Amino acid sequence: MFLIAVLAAAVALASIFGSERLSFFDLSDQQRSILFDIRLPRVFLAACVGASLAAAGAGLQALLRNPLAEPYLLGVSNGAALGTMLAFVLFENLEYSRPVMAFAGAAAATFVVYQMAKGRAGMTVERLVLSGVIVTTFLSSVIVLFTSILDAAKLRSFTFWLLGDLSQATKNGAILCLIAAVIGTVVLASQARGLNLMMIGERDALDFGVEVSRVRLLVFGAGALLVGASVAASGSVGYVGLVVPHLVRMATGSDNRSVIPFSAIAGAAFVVLADLVARTAIAPRELPVGAITALIGAPVFIFLLRRN
Amino acid sequence: MAAFILLSTTACSRPAAENADSSAATQLSPSDAVSTRTVTDDIGRQITIPASVRRVISLAPSVTESIFAIGAGDRLVGDTTYCNYPEEAKAVAKVGDTLNPNIETIVALKPDVVFVSGASQLETFTNTLDRNRIAVYVINPESLDEVVESLDRLAEILGTENAAKTLSDKIGRKRVEIGEKVGTYLAEDPSEEAYEKRVGVRRVFVQISREPLFTIGKNSFLNQLIYEAGGKSVTADVDSAFPKLSKETALALDPDVIILSDSPDNQGPSEVFVNSSAVKNKRVYKINADIISRPGPRLIDALEQIAKDLHPEKFHD
């Protein structure tokens, strides 16, 4: 309940403040357009992106029993980024090419990591993380290679997007991201019990009748969906998937039945507030939201590390 | 304000340039190559260059355009992959792009002078070039006046003063012509308000990129150019040269005219302008991105086109 109140407060604040001052009791046509066509879709998108990234982070951390697991670490984000980049280059004019390609990229990267991790002796967490790191660095190189041959004009919008940018929010984009966020979070939450048991140990989970490979597939699939949708909409907004689930776990314990939904809500509030700062700090100019989340996220994470 | 600047540049003649002969460079034989002279660049550095400069490299498209415009293109032995104008510039040996020039290629081309456009470029390779006795000259004009002045200084280095004089006179005449049509002159009352009323100043939004929305800000040389063309940039008080602008603010600005810097990602006005005066009155214009981003001799063409876009009724011919 507390978290929902925080999210509501964050959304209210973010709707009230922006680079333009609005007289809420007497909106002119222009102000109405600013509020409904620009500000609210953006706040809404920020919430969806935050929820998606935090829920995906919570799910992957539980699955891999690794507190560092994050969409970035596992190649999912870079897969989505490369997909989006290809959409930039190849299908510039197709409206939904970016989300579709981002999801395809995220799913493809996940699939590759998954296949690489499946050794003869079955899948171990170490193999998974290692495969994730390899795929991540490989995809990073491909992205760097592409950016150096991209022409200057395209490069500029891509670079900005890469830093995390919510200014391209549209109503349709926000709705698409919301659908992905809801489906992904529900799927993850539905696997929470299985994840809880797998956190004790995969053998124990098997003994309790958990279909480990099915849980893995669903969690990975949901992760790819969540990350693909948010990367396509906003680029790379870092640290959300890492920091938010940790904070939630500290507050509520590590039962995934609460960690996953609570992370989604807290992540939404976090990104909404970070984007509020990005929009207003140097208005009428804007900062990349990814820089704000990293500025807050990195110190918080160091603090958490030192405490444990 | 613009009227003042106009008159000061066109009225100014340069007796020194008259005397200097472009053949001075060719009179020197290779054995005289040791004789040197000292010149001062745009950031006040004293630079020693050979008396006769035969081989130069340009690391900025604007400088490349200037060198060709003053008739010294045959002296250019290296330029960047961005240098696409004039056509001959494409055939010059490429030394990389502006941000990543290849130092080995530069040294191998044995230039007398390397022209760079920004002080930031200096640090990367000045030391290496110094060791090879290659002078680095910073040339970075920030207005049409400074462009004209930079042409003169380039000509002084390259010994093509006559061609440069012809060019800067031509630019000066064109400027006066445009100023007369727009109404930049006739300044009985020199105040800004009087100017804006007389000229019928249009409120202009320059869109550099559509998504994300980039425009021009306080530090762009385009502000002054637009003012001279009879307009006023609505984002002239926003910090930095090319700010990413809040869409809320852009919508509230409601410009009369939108100028699109013509590039593949910038083919139409941002959707926030749907209800703006500019879009309603179909006052959206495209302009070649190169001529409004390079402080070179084609800036005069940019001035002319912007003036025509802002005040089509004053340009009948």
Image (cartoon, rainbow, N blue to C red):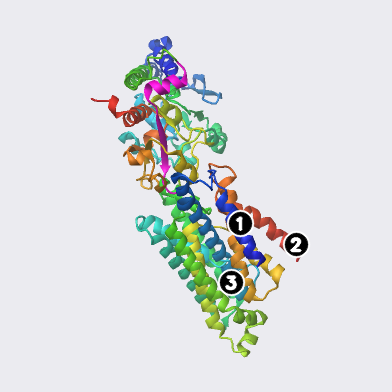
Picture residue at 41% right of the left edge, 59% below the top: A86
Q: Which residues are magenta?
A: B190-211
Q: Which quarter of the image is occupied by the C terminus of chain B?
A: top left
Q: Is residue B243 above or below residue B189?
A: below
Judging by the rendered image, the residue that carries numbered circle 3 is A60
Picture residue at 65% right of the left edge, 82% below the top: A201
Q: Mark 3 falls within which chain?
A: A
Numbered tag placed on residue A306 in the rendering: 2
Numbered tag placed on residue A10 in the rendering: 1
Distance between the alpha carbons at the discs numbered 1 and 2 = 29 Å
Q: Mark 2 falls within which chain?
A: A
Of badges 1 and 3, nearer the viewer stands 1
Please tell me which of labels 1 and 3 falls first in the chain: 1
In the picture, measured across the screen, residue B10 lies left or right of residue A275, that is: left
Question: Where residue B185 sits: x, y (%)?
Answer: 38, 16
Please tell me which of labels 2 and 3 falls first in the chain: 3
